[in-house]
Image (tube, coloured by chain):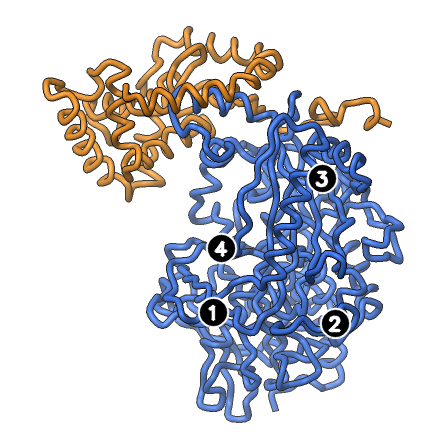
Chain colours: A orange, B blue
Amino acid sequence: MSTGSRSRREFLLNSAAGLSAAWVTANYAGILEAAAYAQQSPAAGPSAALAFFRPEQAAEVEAMAAQIIPTDDTPGAREARVINFIDRALTTFEKDRQNDYTQGLRELETQTKQLFPSATKFSALTSPQQIQVLTAMEKSKFFELVRTHTITGFFASPAHGGNYNKIGWKLVSYDDSMKFQPPFGYYDALPQFRQ
Amino acid sequence: MIQFTPSTEVDFVIIGSGAAGGIMAKQLSTAGFKVVVLEQGGWGKYGHEQDYTKDEYLNDNATGDDQLMTDPAKQPNTFRRNANEKAVPGVHSYGCVVGGGTVTYGGSSWRHLPWEFNEATTVGAVPGTGLADWPITYEELEPYYTQAEWEMGISGQKLNNPNVAPMTKDYPVPPVPMKASGALMRMGASKLGLEVIPGPLAIITKPYQGRSACVNCSSCSGFGCHVKARSSSAVAMIPLAEKTGNCEIRVRSYVREISVDNNGRCTGVVYFDKDRKEIFQKAKAVILSANGSETPRLLLLSKSARFPDGLANSSGVVGKYLMLGGGAGASGLFEHPLNDYKGVVTGAAIVDFVKTDPKRGFYGGGRMTARGFDTPINYALRGLQPGSPRWGSAYKKALMAEANHKMTVSCFVTQLPLETNRVDLDPDVKDAWGLPAMRITSTSHPDDFKAMEFFRQKSLEILQAAGATKVWAGPVNDSRGSAHNRGTCRMGNDPKASVVNKFHRAHDVPNLFIIDGSNLVTGGRNHPTMTIQALAFRAADNIIKAAKTGQITRL
């Protein structure tokens, strides 16, 4: 990991820390549930047959996605089956991006070999090595596309193949129920607002 | 449903079925006139409770019957700040479905205030701008505001407040419940001596006219309402128009020209049908309600020997005085969860700064609204504070930490009408039908920037006073495109300085009526829909009277 990326990530991690405590308290049940889903699921990772990617391509894209939204103390892109979303998007709504992936995976290979000449593929690198490769290409169009697709797949309706078991929604405490009644949140439930 | 053959001369062809077009269709067909509505979009697939899912990705990528907004690939537009710049690809997008923008809008339904109709007189001229008085007064329009609120179905609360337009009658249904973001705004505002009031919304809170009340689902602004609680033209007007047996809604009809005869009267319109076949629909009169940007574009496309500079454009004013509207705001983080993904986008507002205050040293004012969590994909792609990590564990942790703790104060601010801000035809770019694309030229007046900056600062103050643990606000900037586009066919008494008269009749073409945001002389505080709807009801009354007394003819 380069010094630059380490300091950036640590700085931002620290800046978010103050809030995560409050958040975890409020959403602990949701997190546990999401984590449980991920653990129970033997098929975390690609489960459905992929329509666009060859298996070795899927492994590379999924490794990228898993660095963009990693699995840490909570589930990440892998458990949310983001790869299924991307594969499906590329054969439905976003067919016109197929070439960007074919091309982009070559860029990934080049970048990987440049930094780690003995490496065979990106997905075989260690996590810090992968972060180094992605940091080197984070300004590229391909990285931006995979980032957009990973995030979209993580938070889109599960109907599109990702956000498995609503993992993404649970992590941002989004509830997809059909109806809600007030009071909705903490502040509008305060006594001065409930007459 | 009735269908007319294009060769049948109908009484009115209406271009567009949005805020104004839907009302015109319902009013004219109810009065017994034969009407064809040409809508470029489809019917839109929503309003079916059984299919109810929160599908942001589908909504963002909708095609066919799911599509609710224009597709920039088919309808490109370009943008430049001034005439010296080369226009670059633009971001202008708007409702493209039966019901137009009212199908997906947030639903804010503020009336113009009485003094907004004569600010040029009461505030005084602002040099270098086209700030002008309207040819009508608030009092003339007031009964039509009431009619629109009751016929469309607007929720709200009648208030005795000098910064809210006076009403002769309360709203038909009560306001939406206050959300956590509204409560926080109220906590901040009260410390600063400001007041938070419930805003009027085109979202019904009780069953009304056979439609369900809002269920606070949160797939709101930008989505078609799954329970039809949003009082769009599509659910409140079009069904009534169709029921008369006098009105045909012809979808996927992309109009390319309003045709005229040698006498300079409209004969009908030429449009591309869904198979891109050119069809001429004959009509005694044309109602143009295509919105504040497409209306002037269509007039400029409708060139003829008699109207070489575009139809109804002897003044040269068509397309000019474009107002996209000003925006400003700030976001903040709070200790406790807001759960603001529940409920409508916004129902709480501060209106204390709506009026131009000479002490502030600039023309302009606006409204401040409280908003919370957007939608998950949009939030995760763009919702974190500037400088946040964009990927990796730190990104994920920030996303999780901020999602349910963030609120935004979003302000709707004046933009002065400038002659140089305009819609015209791009000389190079074409749309999917081979027609010149829309080109937007717009930059805000220095006073607009001062107004936006004022609201940016106030937003930060309110969030801080509310106890935010962190606040941030991006710099204010020009709008490049907007669903609130207005002013491009302004209404006025002087045919040399305006496009339509006070009854919406084109000065140059006696059987052409233009009714939409393009008529607005001043833009209000960037909340145009309620005024467009009131104007439409008023225009319809006058057009019906004129038609019934033989004052609208092709001869």
Q: Which residue lies furthest to the left in this view?
A: A118
Q: Taking B211 as reference, is B533 above or below it?
A: below
Q: In which quarter of the image is residue B134?
A: bottom right
N-term-proximal mark, 4 vs 2: 4
Mark closest to the chain's N terminus, 2 or 1: 2
Distance CA(mark 2)–CA(mark 3) = 46 Å
The circle on residue B93 is: 4
Marks 1 and 4 sit apart, C-alpha to C-alpha, by: 17 Å
Q: As shown in the figure, which amino acid type bears the numbered disc 4?
A: Ser
What amino acid is at disc 1? Val
Q: How far is disc 2 from disc 1 in space, using C-alphas? A: 40 Å
Circles 3 and 4 on the same subunit: yes
Say which residue label 1 marks. Answer: B255
Lower sequence index among marks 2 and 3: 2
Q: Is residue B460 or residue B505 the one in the foreground?
A: B460
Residue B124 badge: 2
> Element type at marker 4?
loop
Whether discs 1 and 4 lie on one chain: the answer is: yes
Do the residues bearing badges 4 and 2 touch, measured as CB atoms within 8 Å? no
| Tag in front: 2 or 3 | 2
Q: Mark 3 points at which residue?
A: B212
